[in-house]
Image (spheres, rainbow, N blue to C red):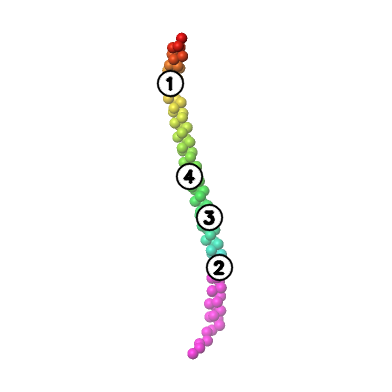
Amino acid sequence: MKTKVNEQITDAVTQSNVKVLGDAPAIALGSIYQAAGYSTGLMFENAVQAQNQQNILAQAATTQGVMQIYSVDTISDAIAIAKILNAGN
């Protein structure tokens, strides 16, 4: 027994399938662009964080250097060097 299906129903199903197939590349490309945008944003976020860490390290190194310079007792060093140099005379 064959049943005849209304042509409007077959047309509606066919149109739905064609629309899904037609939209698939656009949706896939949209997903790729979204993933690429997210990855790029994350990359820049990591770069900024690394730059901040480098700035903190540079400031700490500068502070240590300045502290070492200021901790040298220049007068007592000058006197000790003068005594060492004059000891041979």
Give the spatial CA distance, label 1 vs label 3: 57 Å
Q: Which residue is mark 2?
A: 23
Q: Residue furthest bottom?
A: 1
- Dot 3 falls on a residue whose secondary structure is helix
Label located before the other in sequence (4 or 2): 2
The residue at the point 56 percent across, 65 percent down is: 25
Q: Which residue is mark 3?
A: 37
Residue type, numbered disc 2: Asp
Q: Which residues are magenta?
A: 1-23
Give the spatial CA distance, label 4 vs label 1: 39 Å
- Dot 1 falls on a residue whose secondary structure is loop
Q: Which mark is residue 26?
A: none
Label located before the other in sequence (4 or 3): 3
The answer to whether the residue labelled 4 contacts the one labelled 1, judged by CB atoms less than 8 Å apart, is: no
Which secondary structure dominates the residues rendered in magenta?
helix
Q: Is residue 14 above or below residue 38?
A: below
Q: Position of residue 22 (x, y in %)?
A: 57, 69
Q: Which mark is residue 49?
A: 4
Q: Position of residue 23 (x, y in %)?
A: 55, 68
Q: Residues within 10 Å of mark 4 (few under 14, many from 20)?
A: few
Residue type, numbered disc 4: Gln
Give the spatial CA distance, label 3 vs label 2: 21 Å
Label located before the other in sequence (3 or 2): 2
Residue type, numbered disc 1: Asp
The answer to whether the residue labelled 3 contacts the one labelled 2, judged by CB atoms less than 8 Å apart, is: no
Q: Is residue 19 magenta?
A: yes
Label located before the other in sequence (2 or 1): 2
Q: Nearer the viewer, mark 2 or mark 1?
A: 1
Label located before the other in sequence (4 or 1): 4
Q: Which mark is residue 73?
A: 1
